[in-house]
Image (cartoon, rainbow, N blue to C red):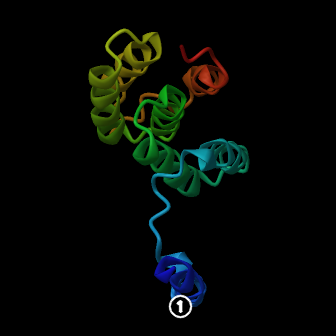
Amino acid sequence: MIFLRAIPLIIIIAVTAAFFVNWDSFDSKNRLYDIPGLYVSADTLFNQSRYDMGFQRYDEIIERDSMQQRAWTEKGVLLNYLERCSESLQHHQEFAKQFPDSANAQRGLFLAEYCDEETGYFAGTNLKEILKSFRGIDYR
């Protein structure tokens, strides 16, 4: 009988608490359902040559789910494309460690090892087009 009298009080407390909770303060990093939207955003930014914002999206995807091989690949392609050689090498070493059987990781690592920031190894070559063609490959 006492339990039945407590039910309205519990409901009132729960509803009141919901109004005072700052829902925006909850950490959204673990929400995996946002990943497809992040890919769309990152791809759009890449196609618009807004590379720094694209990096942020790929980093966010990897942070939320480190098993997203596509994000690792796309970020590596972008680093090589922009000739950010030292970052690319470090990224591809981590990528190859995370996915040792990945052809994309090995391919990216190979290219990163031959990238030279001082001489601009990729500048004026067809490698930029090759790197762009890496986008959209099978990530399994």
Percent x, y of residue 115? 36, 28
Measuring 39% from the left and 42% from the top, which residue is drawn there?
84
Mark 1 burial class by Cα count in 10 Å: few <14, some 14-19, many 20+: few
* Camera-side residue of 90 and 129: 90
* Camera-side residue of 105 and 88: 105
* Camera-side residue of 103 and 89: 103
The quadrant in which residue 87 appears is top left
Residue on which the image places disc 1: 20
Measuring 47% from the left and 71% from the top, which residue is drawn there?
26
Percent x, y of residue 102? 42, 12
Residue with the most extreme front position: 1
Q: What element carries label 1?
A: helix
Percent x, y of residue 68? 49, 31
35 displayed left or right of 59: right
Measuring 51% from the left and 79% from the top, which residue is drawn there?
1
Task: Give above or below for 29 relative to 106.
Answer: below
7 displayed left or right of 118: right
28 displayed left or right of 36: left
Total marks placed: 1
Percent x, y of residue 51? 58, 51
Measuring 44% from the left and 10% from the top, which residue is drawn there?
103
62 displayed left or right of 131: left
* Camera-side residue of 119 and 50: 50
Q: What amino acid does circle 1 point to?
A: Phe
